[in-house]
Amino acid sequence: MVDKILFKRKKIGIIGVGNMGQTILHGLLASEAIPVENVFIANRTPGKIKKIQEKFKVRSFDNNEELIDFCDVVIIAVKPQDFSGCIENIAGAFTDSKIVISLAAGITAQSIQNLLPAVTQIIRVMPSTPAKIGKGVIGYTLNHGAKNLDTFIESILSPLGYVIQTEEGELFEALTVSCSSGVGFVFEFMQYWQEWLEEHGFEENIARKMTVQTFLGAAMLADKDSVNSIEELQNKVVSKKGVTSSGLSSIREMEIERSLRYSFEKAVLRDRELGKQVN
Ligand SMILES: NC(=O)c1ccc[n+]([C@@H]2O[C@H](COP(=O)([O-])OP(=O)(O)OC[C@H]3O[C@@H](n4cnc5c(N)ncnc54)[C@H](OP(=O)(O)O)[C@@H]3O)[C@@H](O)[C@H]2O)c1
């Protein structure tokens, strides 16, 4: 309880309020995990700042350095390609008391440490776009100096989805690809579903609703039923030589699992490549 009150007093700054910066901002404010007067933003394009301020009523800084000076916790939400350019000239503003939270795919805590030598507390967070509505998976990993910050980070992240702490490396990469990029993969499937329904005569908005409810229904059933494995739940849809069985055979013949695994592995390689932008 005392911790929670202390956390609420921390000043949190977000550098880069694009897709994910705004998602985190939205989630944080909606959850009331941090009061709006303690949340600050900065962004390269000033026009974006103005719109976001109007929408969220948060205060902003004209430049990143001022935000870093003022805030206890700095969330860096710029693209991995922009990461070092965004902080290397102002690394001195990151004094040893600052907590740095990076959302950047691929960029390791060690690389961040190399860029910001004074900082000892580094947290990598891997959110996904459903964080905007408090859903999906949100992973985090703590560097050595941040090991005691798990309660703090979970109090910020838990309103944004299902939170998992992992080690850096294979686990964090797998989480990044399957749960963060994975949302994009699921939307790819959902588009196929909707398009097929439309081709068969359903109106666009109805086809969309049918698609969403099918995915939601399956996901919620799997979520609520803790007894049956996903395979067992699938078996309940399948009757021997029935309609589902026939469709599933084709899915397996077409080796969709192999294709998906290949996509995951490719995405992991890209994650590593992005990490090499900062060393
Ligand atoms: N999108 C996702 O689903 C997702 C999921 C997990 C993690 N992430 C991570 O989240 C980070 C942001 O991704 P995104 O999709 O939100 O990208 P984005 O939409 O392009 O947003 C990046 C924002 O950073 C701003 N920016 C760039 N350089 C800056 C600088 N030097 N100072 C201040 N602001 C600067 C950009 O400003 P402008 O307005 O000038 O472009 C833009 O608003 C990435 O590192 C990504 O790996 C994203």
Image: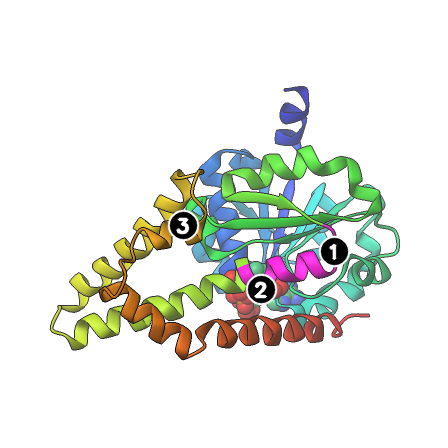
Task: Give the quadrant of ligand 1.
Answer: bottom right
Residue 10 or residue 218, whichever sits in front: 218
Element carrying mark 2: helix
Q: Where is residue 207 drawn, in percent x and y? A: 19, 65
Q: CA distance from mark 1 to mark 2?
A: 13 Å
Q: How many marks?
A: 3
User: Is the shortest distance between ligand 1 and the CB of mark 2 under 8 Å?
Assistant: no
Q: Do the numbered discs 3 and 2 sit on residues whose CB atoms are within 8 Å?
A: no
Q: Do the numbered discs 1 and 2 sit on residues whose CB atoms are within 8 Å?
A: no
Please state if 136 lies on the left or on the right of 220 as rendered.
right
Magenta segment boundaries in residue numbering: 167-178
- Indicate the quadrant where residue 157 lies: top right
Kindly give the residue lying farthest to the top in the view shown.
1
> Residue 232 has which mark?
3
Please state if 165 lies on the left or on the right of 189 as rendered.
right
Look at discs 1 and 3 and give the one toward the viewer. 3
Q: Which residue is mark 1?
A: 168
- Indicate the quadrant where residue 71 lies: top right
- Indicate the quadrant where residue 99 lies: top right
Element carrying mark 3: helix
Q: Which residue is mark 2?
A: 177
Q: Is residue 145 magenta?
A: no
Q: CA distance from mark 1 to mark 3?
A: 32 Å
Q: Where is residue 132 drawn, in percent x and y? A: 44, 49
Residue 54 in view (yes/no)? no
